[in-house]
Image (cartoon, rainbow, N blue to C red):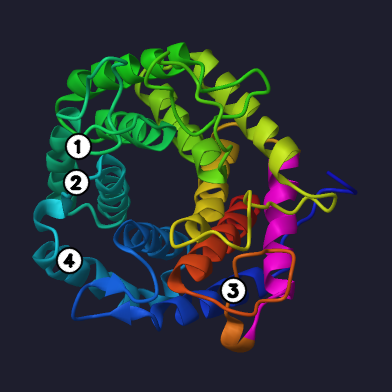
Amino acid sequence: MHGETLRPADDSSRLRTRSAIRTLLQWYNHDTGLWSTTGWWNSANVLTVLADFSAIDPSLDDTIRPIFRNTFEKAQQISPGFLNDFYDDEGWWALAWLKVFDLNHEQCYLQMAVTIFEDMTLGWGGPCDGLWWNKTHTYTGAIENELFLAVAAQLANRAATEEYYIQWALKQWDWFQGTGMINAEGNINNGIDATSCKNDGQTVWTYNQGVILGALVELDRAAPDKSYLEMADRIALAAIKKLTDEDDILHEPGEPSLGEDGPQFKGIFVRNLQNLHKARPRNIFEEFLQINSESIWRNRGTNDQLGVVWSSPTEEATAATQSSACDALIAALSIGAELQ
């Protein structure tokens, strides 16, 4: 990182984050419980963003908190139980409801995560073991396995049958390390080759570097072992080294042309990096989050819309780009709250 550690500027960080969240709320569809301009799994991440914001700033709770119940009821009319043909989609919704449970402690949200996880366990197996990406068993990737670890570890810290979830989490982590998906540079590639059952060498996406961080923080809490946070630290530093520009701004490989899924990815990384920073503080993480937050805001568009490229002026925004950027604003705001 360049220069000295940045500190949040009084209330400006809070005010800008509120404004960006208000813009994000404009895409909410009360009839479906989802967000227009983006997809099913993305909406789970938007919900997570709102819960994260509410946890540190209750100023918009009159609008945000009813959304949790509305989405819980309405979105199930599309996919009952938040289950579909993709185990990664299911993992995102499990994490979203766990976040809401942490916020309001209503058991229905915890139970939903428990039920989703049980469906995910049915995807474990195949010639390479691990969790399949989908229910037609066409690919085994990093993200669904990281999500499986994250949900298992979180449930170990929240549900009654702690040992059951710890055993799943440990099994998953042992398997994950054995695949070599964490490459020699400390970056995580996209998945495994179906023939060799080893790293397939595909794209190093930001979200694959992110979910694992939060998962290992939760695993260390459930079954303390210093190696978990040491590995998370290594992955985070490797991601920052590989995926940032000369000004320390995070970039997704191939941006701005990222399809429907890719615009969500960077926010997932910074969200989980902030979780790691809370557990294992580092100046480099704090600086990184503050620098990216400042760049996002500097490049905002009309009505505080936030785009997919965090180093360039916003030309177009969606619920995915807005929520992803909000992840960064919330992460920076969270650090500021910890410092006060």
Locate residue 100: give its quadrant: bottom left
Q: Mark 1 or mark 3, which has the lower sequence index?
A: 1
Q: Pick the quarter of the image with the C terminus.
A: bottom right
Where is residue 334 shown, x and y percent of the image?
56, 55
Residue 326's place in the image compared with 128, above or below, is: below
Q: Which mark identifies residue 306?
A: 3
**Of tags 3 and 2, which is closer to the observer?**
2
Q: Mark 2 or mark 1, which has the lower sequence index?
A: 2
Picture residue at 48% right of the left edge, 74% below the top = 318
Question: Is 296 contained in the magenta span?
Answer: yes
Badge 2 marks a residue whose secondary structure is loop
Question: Is 44 contained in the magenta span?
Answer: no
How many residues crowd around disc 2 within 10 Å: few (fewer than 14), some, or many (20 or more)? few
Q: Pick the quarter of the image with the N terminus.
A: top right
Name the residue type under label 4: Ala
Cα distance, mark 4 to mark 1?
23 Å
Q: Which mark identifies residue 136?
A: 1
Badge 1 marks a residue whose secondary structure is loop
Name the residue type under label 1: Thr
Q: Which mark identifies residue 75?
A: 4
Residue 292's place in the image compared with 126, above or below, is: below
Decide: marks 2, 1 in contact (CB < 8 A)? yes
Cα distance, mark 2 to mark 1?
8 Å
Cα distance, mark 1 to mark 3?
36 Å
